[in-house]
Amino acid sequence: MNWLKKIIRTFFYVLSGSILSTAIFITIFWPGLTFPITIVWQVIIMSAITSCGILFFYSKREISKKQMKVRLVLHYTYINVIVLGVAILCHWIDPTNLVQVVSMIFLVAAVYISVNLAMFNHEKRTADHINQRLRSKYPDEKKEE
Amino acid sequence: MKIIIEECSPGEEDQIIFRCKELNDNILKLIAELKQGQKKLTGIKDGNIIVIDPASVYYFEGVDNKVFLYCKQNVYETKQKLYEIEEDFKNTDFFRASKSIILNASKIKSISPAYSGRFEAQLFNGEMVVISRQYVPELKKKLGM
């Protein structure tokens, strides 16, 4: 259930980032053109598939820092493959146009960093709340330092 | 909190009665301490058996079917199993931090995010311990969050 919640939360982060990226991409490469509603659904489906990539971090055992780095690389590769695959299949980009391909990779990196920053901030807030509670519940423990 | 001591009739069993509005964390902790009595832990180091006050334990760790208890500077082996320790120290400051670690919340200096819902706890003795994603709610509950 916890993982389902995480997937749903990630989905909304990715969806916001993807819509923003799509708007930037279309403004740069196809300004003035109008698109059918199907493109919105394509973005939603792509966001849902990429959100499931969070399962790369699922493990029944404790993940070491090294394993975590490997999983991060695999996750990032998965995101790139899905986004570029969907972009080519749905004709968002011309695979022979290097500028479009590179721009897409750049946008994926931008969304990836933004999503991870947002999730880090969420966890940072939780950590801050826990630290506050620790300080109020154990005010005398500092003496041990 | 008011403390009333009444003398009981000869032959009557000694008893402790808590009159409270609700069973809050402090009272639960007090009950746990009463149940444990002056329970001490025994640790083995260099073939010597040492009696240890549970309050001085930072964390317990299970490694290769052995359980170790970590104090401020020293590490001792204990013959108790992790699940027994978890049961014995329920309603105290100890909580399960990962599959192999039971951590003393009062020894946590601060926590910080460690990606994917995990947190890293810095202890007052400078050690770092990972709190698994699935055990974070247990820490929050322990802190009344």
Image (cartoon, grey):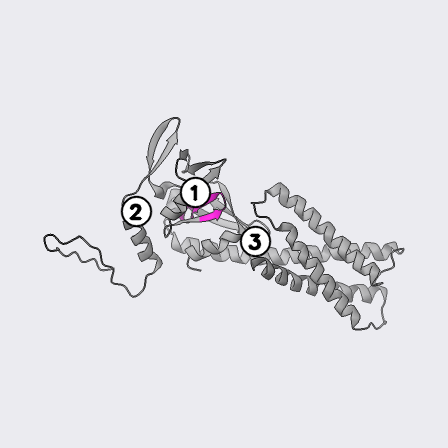
Give x and y (percent) for residue B6: 14, 57
Mark 2 and mark 3: Cα distance apart in space: 34 Å
SS for callout 3: loop
Height in image: B35 above or below A115? above
Q: Which residue is mark 1?
A: B82
Amino acid of disc 1: Leu
Height in image: A69 above or below A44? above
At horizontal 66% and vertical 62% (from top left) the residue drawn is A11
On residue B117, which mark appears? 3
Q: Is residue B102 magenta?
A: yes
At horizontal 80% and vertical 56% (from top left) the residue drawn is A84
* Residue at the extreme front of the image, as rendered: B11
SS for callout 1: helix
Amino acid of disc 2: Gln
Give x and y (percent) for residue B82: 43, 42
Tell which subunit mark 2 falls on. Answer: B
Give x and y (percent) for residue B90: 38, 50
Q: Is residue B134 magenta?
A: no
Mark 2 vs mark 3, foreground winner is: 2
* Label 2 or label 3, whichever comes before in sequence order: 2
Q: Which residue is mark 2?
A: B36
Tell which subunit mark 3 falls on. Answer: B
At horizontal 56% and vertical 58% (from top left) the residue drawn is A2
Report if residue A19 is visible in the image.
Answer: no
Which residues are drawn in magenta?
B96-107
